[in-house]
Image (spheres, grey):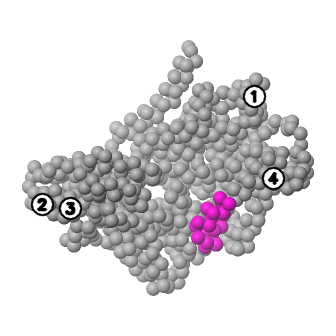
Amino acid sequence: MSRTRKLRLVAVALVAPLLLTACTRAAEPTTPAAVDAPVAANKIKAPAKTLGIWQSQGDGEGQVETLAGIKAAADALGWKVVVTDSNGDQQAMQSTMQSLISQKVDAILTVFVASGLIAAQLGQAKAAGIPVLSVGYQGTPNENITAEYAPDQAEEAKLLLERMGQDLGEGAKIAPIAVQGYYGIDQVMAALDAQKAQYKFDVLQTANAPVADIFNGQTKAASSFLNANPDLDAFYAALDIGPQAIAPALKQTSREVPIYSFGAISSALESVRNGQAIVATSDGTVKAGFLAVDALLALWVNNTPIPTTIPAEHALTYQIVDKTNAPAKGASVYPLADISKPFFDSWTTKYGAA
Amino acid sequence: MTVESDARPETRPAPKTRGFAGTRLSSGQSWERWILPGVFVLTVAFFTIARPGAFLTVDNGRSLLQQNAPLLIVLGGLCVVLAMREFDLSFASIAGASGALTVQSLVLFNATVWSAVFYGVVLGPLLGALNGVLVGYLRVPSFIGTLATGSIIQGIMQAIAYQTVFEGIPNEYMDLTLARFLGVPINLIVIGLVLLVIGAVLRYSVFGRQAAAIGDNPDAARIAGVNVRRAKLIGFTISGACAGVAGVLLTSTAGQYYPDPGAALLLAAYAAAFLSLSLGRGWRFNVGGALLGAVFLACVTTGVTMLNYPSWLSQFLQGLVLLTAVYLLTRRQVAK
């Protein structure tokens, strides 16, 4: 056997197991923590459109929920959806946005947008007449973003701080953990800063996890806080993955310090159910996709201008989730079926069945 | 543990002492060699005084090592590759793929904990061997070759785990990094043993001498009868194996799979490995120095957090230390 052939065989032997694994995964049913299904809907009469979905980091749990909402809404209208994911790569964020503009999609929905990184592309989209709607997460304000439909993180923070005030009392020592560079996170940190005097919290210096080490960075910071502060009363985790990132530090140090965080994503609910975490959340993460599609449908059918913020009749709801009201394992705080039904009913009434 | 990668006897004439850079304390050692340990001791002393009863404690030391266990294990493999003057830019992706495969095996295929760990760990050397074939046999430059394979592996990892939240991981898997023997986490004991073996292999074995010879001059090593291709294959396989173990540790510590878990290992490992140069005899990567470098960098991060200083300070200090160490070593080399 020639050397080249041997090398080919070795290469095939190395790659084959990986391909096999990947293919096997593709054939598997959706994972246990996947987003629940929307209510079954008849197709609604709507003009044929293509939505471009731009995601900065599509594999986060919250982003998955937002995308599921968008897809469910678009599917009911028979709209085509082109999904892109930049995987946190700043270069890719620009190129994926550019590709959506080049494909001449009818509208672009951005999920977890850092506007400054794609400012030029946002300008191009506006020039091309493509509406850009920021959904699910608050992005850095930009004049070229047509509308934003996302939970108000400052509102969530206010709710959470009220709860912390009730639970912890005056003088409680709080360890904040965050990541720099995201508008929504800045909002919840600003809320803590503004209201800590009201509750007389002793707030430690914020530990910012590096973006490249967003999970372990939080775990390491939590460990340091725990070891340096035997009297620590609580963590204030700005990211929705905070509870799951801090939990290993609690386990390793055998400590029981409550985690106050944001967003009822599936893995955070594990910590909520066992009493480790308390989260402030909103239905906006999922509902945002429906709101965006609703606005676009009204624009394209009735020529109704896109509301720049969430209309009053669709106001988001906010709540605290703790172990007393946490949903059972596998269930969501805001099931997709519950969120989708009013929209499907409304669209069928307004626009008729296809 | 301070084990150098060069078992080859020093044949070059001893450097002449000339001014700052060549000052010698004793035979074969210049004072720059003690920079890293010295700064490390001073740093620990500073944080200990600043946070008495919090920084220099068993609990904090254990937490610090536990959190950095994946980094420590990949350093072993990286030092082998670097000793041959090759780069491995794919080990972080390999760690991520191994973690993804392990957790996927547990949750989706209901594999037992040990068989899932086996799959994850075995994936590491397989992918490492792929790098070894590319670099050693196909003569693809390691820098770009492993960059490419890292990208490919990352793509496959996303295919395996993309947009997936893995729940239902058995507690036994998470206990892998929590179990202790005489108060010491068992995973740290295993990592210590593995690194001891790698360090000893690099310093005392024929393979270690071959690696150093290849690092000095691959053509000369080939003419001297060293099987350079095979040595590179072995080196990259070891690096992949260490990354495979790191992937399991990452996901076990976290108790779940999260996107791209190995991403943060890449730069941290290279920073620690380059700090090890200050403990080697002139630009020699060594496991002991790399470990000291990694622990030192971790101490800075932990100390800054404990002292309630802003987070940016730790990255600033880490960069400053690395730059200073490499600068002083460069001066030493120029002097020689």
Q: Position of residue A180 (x, y in %)?
A: 49, 65
Q: Chain of mark 1?
A: B
Q: Which mark is residue A295?
A: 3
**Do marks 2 and 1 share a chain?**
no
| Label placed on residue A302 | 2
Q: Which percent across, then down, holds residue A64?
A: 35, 54
Q: Quadrant of residue B299?
A: bottom right
Q: Which residue is mark 1?
A: B221
Question: Which subunit holds the residue at mark 2?
Answer: A
User: Which one is nearer the viewer's eye here, B181 or A111?
Assistant: A111
Left or right: residue B171 compared with residue B230: left
- Residue where numbered disc 4 is placed: B33
Amino acid residing under circle 2: Asn
Which residue lies at the image location 50% right of the left edge and 41% below the top edge?
B151
Q: Of helix, strand and loop, which one carries label 4?
A: helix
Q: Secondary structure at mark 1?
A: helix
User: Of label 2 and label 3, which has the lower sequence position?
Assistant: 3
Write the start and end of the magenta stretch as one range. Answer: B300-320
Q: Is residue A27 or residue B113 the one in the foreground?
A: A27
Query: What amino acid is labelled 4 in the image?
Result: Arg
CA gap between label 4 and label 2 equals: 76 Å
What whole-number distance in Å separates the C-alpha atoms at marks 2 and 1?
77 Å
Q: Badge 2, how many Cα within 10 Å: few under 14, some, many 20+? A: few
Measure how far apart labels 3 and 4 are at the Cα level.
67 Å
Question: In terms of secondary structure, where does tag 2 sit?
Answer: helix
In depth, the one of B219 and A38 nearer the eye is B219
Give SS at disc 3: helix
Asked if residue B317 lies in the magenta stretch, the reply is yes
Q: Disc 1 and disc 3: Cα gap in Å? A: 70 Å
Using the image, name the chain to which the residue with label 4 belongs: B
Query: Residue B11: x, y in percent?
Result: 86, 36
